[in-house]
Amino acid sequence: MILGMSLEAFTTLHVVLSLIGIASGFVVVLGMMGGKRLPAVTMLFLVTTALTSLTGFLFPLKSVTPAVILGILSILVLLLATIALYGRHLAGAWRGTYVISAVVALYFNFFVLIVQSFLKVPALNALAPTQSEGPFKIAQLLALVVFISLGTLAFRRFRPLLPQMV
């Protein structure tokens, strides 16, 4: 039992949070590419992505794993994105800090989606049972290239009007 839920129910909650974070994250990044802030979707993305990382720490573990390290890194970049957006209001270099950290947080979540897909989806697992095979490496490389491209475009195009401070 984790937080009063069976391991299966908790895992489902964790996966649903992750998928919401990924979907809303893509909407946020596409919004950035169009120069839009999308405050409600951004909040959804930041909260669900943070909850994905935090719930990941609650699974029974016997040692520090790559997933734990990635979870810690995800929390750090989400904290940076949150400070840049809500604490520093995207002023000056904080705009770029926000864009980069938000895209990196989304990439981390998507990276784990690929890993879990190759572990849990039988057809993908058959292609790369140890995740050292070509199809897995190609999927991760393509994801990295896509996120670098999205991040670059978002960095160049996201220049929202800052609210007037009274």
Image: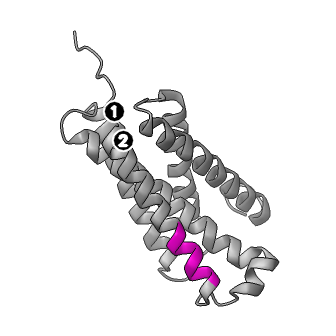
Label placed on residue 64: none
Element type at mark 2? helix
Q: Main secondary structure of the magenta part?
A: helix
Q: Tell me what residue is drawn at x 47 percent, y 28 percent.
A: 39
Q: Quadrant of residue 158?
A: top left
From the viewer's perspective, tell me whether residue 132 is left or right of residue 144: right
From the viewer's perspective, tell me whether residue 118 is left or right of residue 47: right
* Magenta span: 135-142
The kind of residue on which mark 1 rests is: Tyr
From the image, tell me which residue sits under label 2. Answer: 82
Q: Are marks 1 and 2 in contact (CB under 8 Å)?
A: yes
Of 70 and 155, nearer the camera is 155
Of 135 and 46, nearer the camera is 135
| Vertical placement of residue 32 versus 114, above or below | above
From the image, tell me which residue sits under label 1. Answer: 86
The kind of residue on which mark 2 rests is: Thr
Element type at mark 1? helix
Q: Tell me what residue is drawn at x 70 percent, y 78 percent.
A: 119
Whole-Å distance between the Cαs marked 1 and 2?
Answer: 6 Å
